[in-house]
Amino acid sequence: MESESKVFFKSKNPIFILALIIVGLISVLFIFKNILFESSLALKSYGKISMDPEIAFNNTKPTFLEFYAEWCEVCKEMAPKIIESKNKYQNDINFVFLDVDNPKWEKYIKQFNVNGIPQMVFLDNNFKTRASLIGFKDEILINNALDKLLDSKQELDIIPVSKFSKIQNHPKDTIKPRSHS
């Protein structure tokens, strides 16, 4: 009887192992999907949580300005952390998020010479650009820059451009969905 049970488990063992592998893969895919979904949701909320640029540029607070696009993978990756930073600093700093695919923001895209996204511009309370960053930046770096923005005596460090999405002008020089690299 005992030898029959050993034979049974040996013959079922590969199926059991395969089932475990499948369950493991499904779990990993589910977790990865949720992380991507959270990032996409965070980015889509930018329009709702953004301060109107005209209000931000005409009050006495410094401003964090981010140019983004919903198709930008780097923007999606950074969005949850940017929202955390907004929640931390929103009483002291204006947060403005402008979608480069919205023709309404074309004048700001030209004014701030946006040629890659995400592009983050740190403006002091006199509307002077203290720093402009292009590409992926981690939460610590952004929060350090926001701290320095609040202290007008501290210089913001120059940070090299990193992973970003290129923006290419449409032949008619209108704002349209851009290519993604």
Image (cartoon, rainbow, N blue to C red):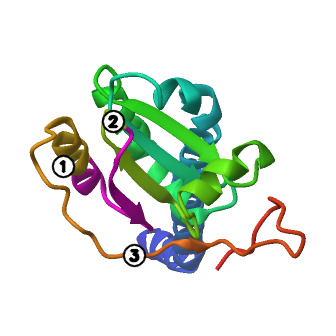
Mark 2–mark 1 Cα distance, whole angstroms, equals 20 Å
x, y percent for residue 40: 61, 48
Taking 131 as reference, is 55 left or right? Answer: right
Task: Return the residue at label 2.
Answer: 126
Residue 162's mark? 3
Q: Where is 142 relative to 152, above or below?
A: below
Residue occupying the point 38% across, 75% down: 161
Q: Which residues are magenta?
A: 127-142
Which disc number belongs to residue 144? 1
Disc 3 and disc 1: Cα gap in Å?
Answer: 17 Å
Badge 2 or badge 3: first in the primary sequence: 2
- In the displayed structure image, the side of residue 29 where residue 78 appears, left or right: left
N-term-proximal mark, 2 vs 1: 2
Q: Position of residue 144 (x, y in %)?
A: 18, 49
In the picture, the disc for residue 173 is: none
Mark 2: secondary structure? loop
Instruction: Identify the residue at horizontal 55%, vertical 68% (top origin).
Output: 16
Residue 111 visible in the displayed image: yes
Which residue lies most toward the left here? 153
Going from N to C along the chain, the mark reached first, 3 or 1, is 1
Q: Are marks 3 and 1 in contact (CB under 8 Å)?
A: no
Q: Among all residues in the image, which is located at the extreme right?
A: 172
Quarter residue 180 falls in: bottom right
Could you tell me the amino acid type at mark 3?
Ser
Q: Nearer the viewer, mark 2 or mark 3?
A: 2
Is the residue under label 1 in contact with that under label 2 (CB below 8 Å)? no
**Percent position of residue 177, x then y:** 80, 62
Q: Nearer the viewer, residue 49 or 107?
A: 107
CA–CA distance in space, label 2 to label 3:
28 Å
